[in-house]
Image (cartoon, rainbow, N blue to C red):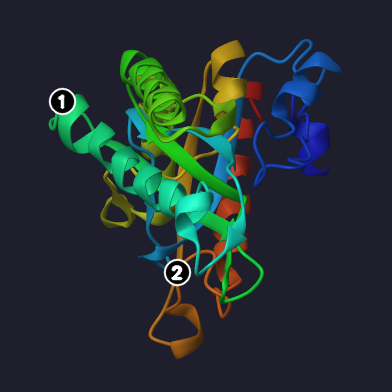
Amino acid sequence: MTIKEQLSGSVVFIFQHAEEKPPGGAREMIADGCLDDVDAVFGAHVASQIPLGEMSCTEGPIMAAVDAFTINIQGKGGHGAHPHTTVDSIVIGSQLVGDLQTVVSRRTDPMDPAVVTVGVFQSGTAFNVIADTAKIEGTVRTFNEATRQLIEEEIRAIVAGKERGAHVSCEINYLNGYPALINPEQESTLVRKLASNVFGEEAVITAPPALGGEDFAFYLQERPGAFFHVGARTDESYTQYPHHHPRFDFDERALLNIGELFLAIAEEYLGAS
């Protein structure tokens, strides 16, 4: 008898497309009906920072809300020898980058984790030309929804103030991406219990929350469930690189561990005999 024949219900597999680019693909999947007739939803993430054989399923907020912004600055270009005839978009953009750092350092509660990161600054074409345009792109990470809203308001206010004070026009596009991923207590406890049964109590750890984002958060807004991290690091050098590093790799035995845990969850919910 196959495992499928032993289950008294159905298991739905969800392909997680476009997860790395907000707004992600989860909302489209939900709108398309992937959660119809689904009672609970669970997800796993390979974790290069956790040793192979260990796993973590922490209750509460474990991954941050992810927002993104683009600021386009329109100044007035000209010759580098005649700055008084221009409106220098690079200088103004540089000031904006610095000003944005004061949102977290001076406007949010230091006990409430938040990040404002500028990842792109593009401007200029030649060493002796004052650029007329500049583009800034960045991301905002938060756990608290009120803090999330506050940061967006502050960024918009800073951009508006720079626009008035520096005699430029600024366009800001602000994308509210993934919400914070919050694991319910009941389902998190269940996953830890099942992981202890499968791998042993010593294999279950409690990893701290991270300001990385994950569009699985949308699923947990619709159904009970949990998201867990499964270790994939060994003493081998190729497993030592963090996620998104160009040399990132992991021990693929972690995938077998994920599979075993998913089977245990399915058996728990669907009453395998």
Q: How many marks?
A: 2
Q: Position of residue 41 (x, y in %)?
A: 61, 25
* Residue labelled with disc 2: 242
Q: Amino acid at mark 1?
A: Asp
In the picture, residue 21 is in which quadrant?
A: top right
The residue located at (48%, 41%) in the rendering is 139
- The residue at the point 33 percent across, 56 percent down is 203
User: Percent from the top left, x then y, of residue 104?
Assistant: 24, 35
Whole-Å distance between the Cαs marked 2 and 1? Answer: 29 Å
Q: Of 82 and 126, which appears nearest the observer?
A: 82
**Label 1: which residue?**
109
Where disc 2 sits, the SS reads: loop
The answer to whether one can see residue 12 in this image is yes
Question: Is residue 261 visible from the viewing direction of this image?
Answer: no
Q: Which quarter of the rendered picture does the N terminus lie within?
A: top right
Which tag, 2 or 1, sits closer to the chain's start? 1
Q: Is residue 171 above or below residue 122?
A: above
Q: In the image, is residue 182 above or below residue 193?
A: above
Q: Tell me the mark number nearer the camera, choosing from 2 and 1.
A: 1
Crowd class of label 1 (few under 14; some 14 to 19; many from 20; radius 10 Å)? few
The residue shown at (40%, 16%) is: 149
Depth check: give the residue in front, 177 or 35.
177
x, y (%) of residue 120?
Answer: 54, 55
Which residue type carries mark 2? Pro
The image quarter in which residue 74 lies: top right
142, 95: nearer the viewer: 95
**Residue 26 locus on image (x, y percent):** 71, 28
Q: Nearer the viewer, residue 177 or 207?
A: 177
Find the residue positioned furthest to the bottom: 237
174 over 57 or under it: above or below: above
Q: Are marks 2 and 1 in contact (CB under 8 Å)?
A: no
133 sits to left or right of 138 = right
